[in-house]
Image (tube, rainbow, N blue to C red):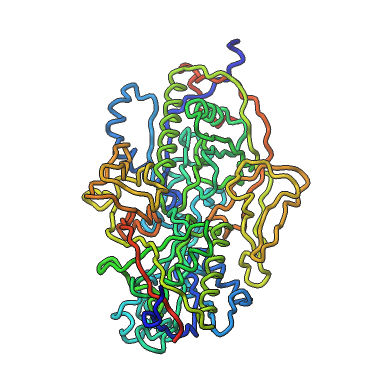
Amino acid sequence: MEVDQVVRLPRLSRVAVCGGTHGNELSGVYLVKELLKEERKVMEEDEKKLVSVLLVLSNLPAMQQCHRYVDTDLNRSFTHATLNDPISDVAPYEVIRARELNAMLGPKGSPEAVDLVCDLHNTTANMGLCLIAYSDRDWICMHIFRHLQREMPDTPIRFIHFDIADKESFSLDSVGKHGFALELGPQPHGVVRSNIYTAMKVGVQHMLNWVRLFNSGTVFEGGFVDVYTLIKHIDYPRDSETHNITAAIHPHLQDRDFCLLHPEDPLFQTFSGETLTYKGNEPLYPFFINEGAYYEKGIALYLARKRRVVVPAIQVQPEQQGFASKKEE
Amino acid sequence: MSSYSNTARVNEARRVAIFGGTHGNEMSGVTLVNLWMKNGIEIQRKGVEVKPFITNPKAVEKCTRYVDTDLNRAFTPENLSAPTGDDLPYEVQRAQEINRMFGPKGSPEAYDVIFDLHNTTSNMGCTLILESSKDYFNLQMMNYIKKAIAPASCLVLLNEHPLLKYSTSRSVAKHPVGLEVGPQPQGVLRSNIFEAMRVILKHALDFIEMFNEGVEFPPCSVEVFRVSERIDYPRDANGNIIAMVHPNLQDCDWEPLNPGDPMFQMFDGKTIHYQGSGTVYPTFINEAAYYEKQQAFVTTRRETLVASSIRKA
């Protein structure tokens, strides 16, 4: 392997693992609580201090109520505008909390921000394990993804790219220099399923192991990642007066996340039994099919294009090249 | 075999209600009742008034289980007889209103039958909930429904337990029937779950129509699962949950749980085993709403109930 083909990236000194960003997504809540219990033991073992891990419970009042949020969705409150524009005394709780988290883990876009944010989520959709990121060329995130795929071959693992400009990025994971949401489903909100919790725990452990390996100089070989890039969403058909939904996800589509949806395939089944079909002109990959929290956002499912992205080999920058770390493009 | 003198005479079921939204985030019932309030042709039957009704509109509006307190625990004698007032919790006010409209509970004026539609995150399939082993009308109806949907399954859960029984919205009626269909996450509408509930109600209403027309239903035996014990999650000294339903038990509602079988898995991976004295049949395994009620699952015992033949009075 030629040395000049390896992309050198700054060390990941500080990694944040966040749970309870949505208070009823319980795998992350219980996992962060468990990691906090184990923290003392972990810190003793990590003598060389290969990485500093910050464990965060993002939205305690929402967790207390076992609701997604108290006033407004915390995971939509991290746009530059929401973080920095003037706010009134009666700002929603989550806007205030987002600013606290930004101060703790950011500030977003600055050199002081943590190197990596891993934000833990669950979904009612049958999505397996997904890494959701804003970039399809953040080699750190993509190598972590490849590592998880290698280490967890029995788990369906996919990489989702939300093609949103940095200015518009809205979620907690956008606060770090690198970041992604670790999304696991299916799990009902307010429930912890042992298989989902265990997959999340194992995923986080492998992620942190990868960071330690990276920081100690391991070269990670290049390869391919199949990236699902979000193109659009489709809402439920709704009653024009009440705005209530008038159909459910069709039984043939329910639970078939990432199975290619072709034009004319069944999409919804109305309450009178009629089938409504997909009217797009290209086949796309559906995901977040029937996510409970998205009814109020007007999203029945998302649709993505899949393409293969070439990922270069990477290695940590050697210590003497100690420039202030910049967010890698 | 049916001797005329052993046939129970039961009053016609003239007034029937279908309750949806008793828990505002259990979407099958909310959706069905809203549908039928708009167009009730599907639930019309000769000789009976069938009223669809949203019991907890504020909770439905917020897509939450309840606003102040669980409506399906609120129909206690204390609540129903308390002086009316705006300072009462919202659901207690609702319980009093529902008791006025569909009761009073225990009186001759009460509705004959109330179907209360629920969903659960547990893998319970279609479940009918019975509150009295002596309600032959309900037993006969449940027997009819089970036969009508066969080979699809519909099990009967009997909650007659003196301590674990609770004061449900349907308890206002002479013949309360709970319909519990899962698994479905809260706030989610799954097409298959919705259709299953719809089919059960169709058969239930057919039964009532036939009964009112004078059909005699011969004696029958019905297998039921009788609620025995509530099992909570293991907790630490501060009351925090420290283990999850074990992967071997998750989704295994109605399957035998034997002493020594895995029951919980701690967050660090350790297994906790069932220590009961005999085989039980767990259900409501990992229901989201029950974490706060200190219930990981309930154990049941299988029993066969016999209903005498019934005919309208």
Looking at the rendered image, the quarter that the N terminus of chain B falls into is bottom left
Q: Is residue B61 above or below residue B110?
A: above
Residue B115, position in %: x, y?
47, 73
Outermost residue, front direction?
Answer: B1
Q: Nearer the viewer, residue B217 or A167?
A: B217
Q: Is residue A318 above or below residue B42?
A: above
Furthest toward the top, the residue is: A2
Q: Quadrant of the C terminus of chain B?
A: bottom left
Residue B55: percent from left, percent from top = 47, 75
Which residue is situated farthest in the bottom direction here?
B109
Can I make out residue B69 in this image? no
Residue in the foreground of this view, choosing between B200 and A262? B200
Say which residue appears at 39% left-offset and 66% top-offset.
B221
Image: A237 above or below A203:
below
Which corner quadrant of the image does residue B168 belong to?
bottom left
Viewed as shown, does residue A220 lie left or right of A279?
Answer: left
Question: Can residue B70 be seen in the rendering of this structure?
Answer: yes
Q: Residue B195: give x, y in percent of width and height.
A: 58, 62
Q: Report the front residue among A318 and B148.
A: B148
Q: Which residue appears at 34% of the width and 84% of the height?
A: B106
Q: Position of residue A106 (x, y in %)?
A: 47, 40
